[in-house]
Image (cartoon, rainbow, N blue to C red):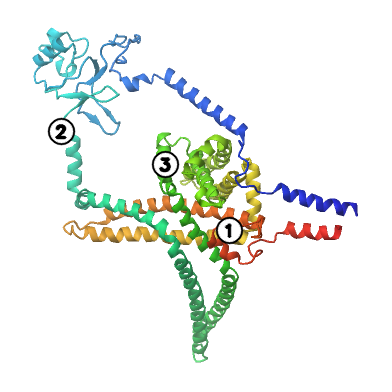
Amino acid sequence: MYHLQIFPTFCILWQKRQDWKPLEDRRCTDIPWLILFALFNVGMLFICGFAISTGAASRLISGYDSYGNTCGQKNTEIPGIESSGKDQTLNKYVFFLDPCNIDLVKRKINSVALCVFRCPETELQTYDDLRKFAFTNGSKLCSYEVSLDRYSDDPNKATKCPKLPVPPSKSFPVFHRCTPADISCYAKFAEALITFVSDNSVLHRVITGVMTSKEIIMGLCLLSLVLSVIMMGVIRFISALLVWLLTAIVVLGSLGGTGVLWWLYVDHRVSANSTLPATELQVAKDNEKALLIYAIAATVFTLVLLLLMFFMRKRVALTIALFRVASKVFGHLPLLVLQPFWTFLTLMLFWFIFIEFILACQQMTVAGAVVTYYFTRDKSQLPLTPLLSSVMSVMRYHLGTVAKGAFIITLVEIPRLILTYIHNQLKGSENGCARCMVKACVCCLWCLEKCLSYLNQNAYVATAINSTSFCTSARDAFIILAENALRVATINSVGDFVLFLGKVLIVSCTAFAGVLALNYQREYTVWVLPLIIVCLFAFLVAHCFLSIFEMVVDVLFLCFAIDTKYNDGSPGSEYYMDKALMLLCGSSYKCQPLTLHCQLCSLIMRIGY
């Protein structure tokens, strides 16, 4: 019996090792990965600095002339290049002899460039004006080899001097280029564009409609933003209606489809009499058999669906309750509404370089704020700004965990992008088998990436609760999710559909408002492009905001699952959950999932003792 007495002890120790202690012990996690991430950034900075120092980055900012001289500094002579190696310390601005001669294909100005002391701020109409400007300001606007006294009679002045009249110009900020102050300088380009638009009547009407209704477009974009914020607040009231409406549509659709199939079967059976020709009779018999198979399959599907609806009705109710609590979270944490803006601004600040990492920081920040809300019994004791407190906690304790999670996603994403590129290159080839295999690999990697992203998000929640490392948090979160697999499936399916309906509602309302607003501009019959622009922006905004809402729901569910596993509502083991979720539990043990290892340990303990 000794081994039977040891095994229950192991089960107890294993269960204790899995205990969750929300917000009790905050410590740094995954420090080695933070060090690796810091070394990576140092290496990137070294590479960037090396590229700037050896790649003549100053030529991009200061500019250079047509002879290889960088403006604003001393230059080394280039063998075989005339007029190179000049000291241009005082000549800091790049001046083009013909600044309006633009090559749209090569994206450059087809003109000789010179380094000058000052840009001409007034129009110069004659060569004598050029010479006077050079004497007065020290800026020689003709090529270096042309002397001042030859400006008027030099035989090559048409190519060595600027095209007359020289338009007034100003220095472009930071980049020290003399650019014409009057945009009419680019009349040729504008004329070509206007000619193209004028020749295409449809394009002309579309562009005219967009330009005329630009105020309406901006107003509708702002409306979609307001509607998205309102939706996050009112979804708690309409989620039940949407869910049960969806349930009713699915059930009625299944019953109606099954009934129609049985009616068609009976109708074909009655009409398939022996008076028909042999060929038509055989066709009717085949159709009758097919309809019978379809009707039986539809009946089985409907019965299974009804059973699932019956047994999962409480899990659907859990989804509705989580939506209601999520709306309350936004009431207590209003800064969550602005989270998409902060993330977008951060991505722009870093030029989208650390996009895996920044999005992971957003997930960890939201998780930390929601966890703090959920596991704080007295909501009046919440921090003044839980979201900012979560940001500070991530920066202080969990950057290593975020870096590790982002690195894992990147490991899957890079091969997927490479294979996608290979697949695109193989489109014109005759090897269909290779294309199919590459596409299959891309799909598998995409599925793996989505699964890892979902697990990563829940691992961040576990880290925010227990302050454990990434791998430990991922393991613990996976166990909790596996124990609540049916709940996860219900929330992901029903919840995603409700949020999708929310996005559709926002886009529809914005489009309807757009139709009403554009109705006042009936002289412009082409409304397609303005409405497409507005609808795309509305969907993008709705997706950004409701994705944060979805993230909050997922965090709340994991907190709820942990709460119901380790608490039973009895004195000393009270629930942390909101009253809306507590109503689902009823008695103490309704919410607790009976897991396989709990049953096994309980049975062995009884045998052992």
Label 1 SS = helix
Q: Residue furthest right?
A: 1
Residue on which disc 2 sits: 184
Instruction: For label 3, count other residues whose C-alpha is less than 10 Å away and answer few (under 14), some (14-19) or many (20+).
Output: few
**Quarter of image, res 161:** top left
Report x, y in % for residue 421. Answer: 48, 42
Instruction: For label 1, count other residues whose C-alpha is less than 10 Å away and answer few (under 14), some (14-19) or many (20+).
Output: some
Q: Which of marks 1 and 3 is nearer the N terminus?
A: 3
Total marks placed: 3
Q: Residue 488 carries which label?
A: 1
At x 46%, y 70%, the residue is 245
Position of 213 with respect to 605 (left or right) is left
Instruction: For label 2, count other residues whose C-alpha is less than 10 Å away and answer few (under 14), some (14-19) or many (20+).
Output: few
Report x, y in % for residue 149. Answer: 12, 7
Nearest to viewer (mark 1 / mark 3): 3
Look at label 1 and name its amino acid. Answer: Val
Residue on which disc 3 sits: 342
Question: In 3D space, how far apart are the residues under numbered discs 1 and 3 (Cα atoms)?
Answer: 29 Å
Q: Is residue 494 above or below residue 11?
A: below
Position of 591 with respect to 119 (left or right) is right
Q: In this view, does 250 lie above or below 169?
A: below
At x 64%, y 51%, the residue is 478
At x 22%, y 14%, the residue is 117
Screen quadrant of the C terminus = bottom right
Q: In this view, does 77 lie above or below 413?
A: above
Q: Foreground: 234 or 373?
A: 373
Report x, y in % for residue 123. Answer: 11, 22
Q: In this view, does 495 lie above or below 260?
A: above
Question: In 3D space, how far apart are the residues under numbered discs 3 and 2 (Cα atoms)?
Answer: 39 Å
Look at label 3 and name its amino acid. Answer: Trp
